Amino acid sequence: MRMKHGHAMVRYAIGIAAVAVALILKFALVPLVTQETPFLLFFTAVMVAAWCGGFGPGLLVTAFSALLSDYFFMTPFYKFEVLNRVEWSKLAMFVCEGTLISMLCAMVRSARERAEVNAEQVRILQERIIDVREREEQRIGRDLHDGLGQHLTGIAFLSRLLSQRLTGKSLPEAAEATKIEELVNDATRQARELASGLSPVAVDAGGLASGLQALAGETQDIFHIVCAFACETPVEIKDASVATSLYRIAQEAVTNALKHGKARQIRIELSVVGGSLRMLVEDNGTGFSGLSPAGEGMGLQSMRYRARMIGASLDIGPGERGGTSVTCVLLNYLRSEA
């Protein structure tokens, strides 16, 4: 209640200050204008008060301005008195216009505040969706690794024993048992790679660096392009959610470079600069020239949300050698990890 009361006082104080400024300027302009314009500049004060404070401050400034105009700039001067119908008409017209301006500015201000609240709610909802998806992916990744992966490993072991027994008896089915073992081992490898993709970053020291190194290696092997990773300074992130978010940003940047940029060379760099953690993903593709934030796809929006969730800045622009450069900076990294 005290906070709301304080905000209200500030809004009304802004209105009074606007009237004071208008009055001072009006006195300064008196030699340059005629007395036919007693409300000069007071309309501006009304608009400032209504825009910053709403209808109440705007209405107060309208009434206050009408009194000041009558007292200082309408005959008889220095008296709260109106002698003729024309002066009354001017005063009434100003009050009506000031009231209308206050209403319109208050409506626009209210609409702007509602839009800001809705935008904030949408942002919070999207961040929650990303967080829930991240947790679910990590859960599935653990289930694949600890559940399905262990079962497949057991099947592969039994297949090897069966193959050895059949081979020992010189039975022709031994070759089929060996083939089953190879297929199960291949399925185990695929399950582990899938689990690694869903829950990619280990919590131990250097987990992010090792995850990015693996991402670069897999990208190079699968897509047959040059994808290099560099990390000259040891990086340790204790918060697994921060490390995972950074990995996902890099993963999305690499995906965009391949899918949209048609890149043949990608460089992932992790470094500590001035106490802040800096992650750079740069490619030599066609880039994202002319892409406005409003036209961004879900991938780029996801990158921005992830960066904001961990308190990092994200800059997407042209690279030094063409293509696209994605730079994510986690400020005060050394202080937060201390």
Image (tube, rainbow, N blue to C red):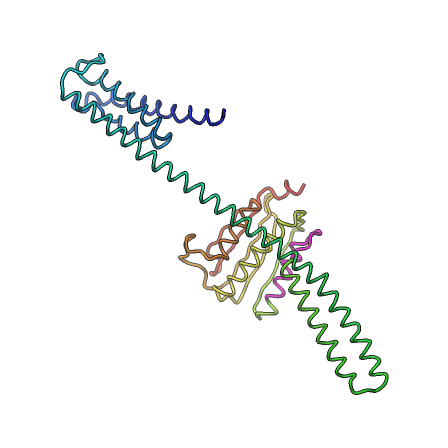
Q: Quadrant of the C terminus?
A: top right
Residue at 42% in and 58% down: 289
State yes or no: residue 213 in magenta.
yes
Q: Nearer the viewer, residue 21 or 90?
A: 90
State yes or no: residue 82 in magenta.
no
Q: Nearer the viewer, residue 64 or 202?
A: 64
User: Where, by quadrant of the figure, is residue 145 drawn?
Assistant: bottom right
Classify 33 as above or below 139.
above
Q: How many marks?
A: 0
Residue 181 located left or right of residue 131: right
**Chief secondary structure of the magenta portion:** helix
Q: Nearer the viewer, residue 325 or 274?
A: 325
Name the spot of residue 9 as percent of width and height, x first.
42, 23
Name the spot of residue 235 as percent of width and height, x first.
66, 50
Residue at 56% in and 60% down: 267
Boundaries of the magenta span:
200-219
The outermost residue toward the right is: 168
Classify 151 as above or below 18.
below
Residue 181 located left or right of residue 288: right
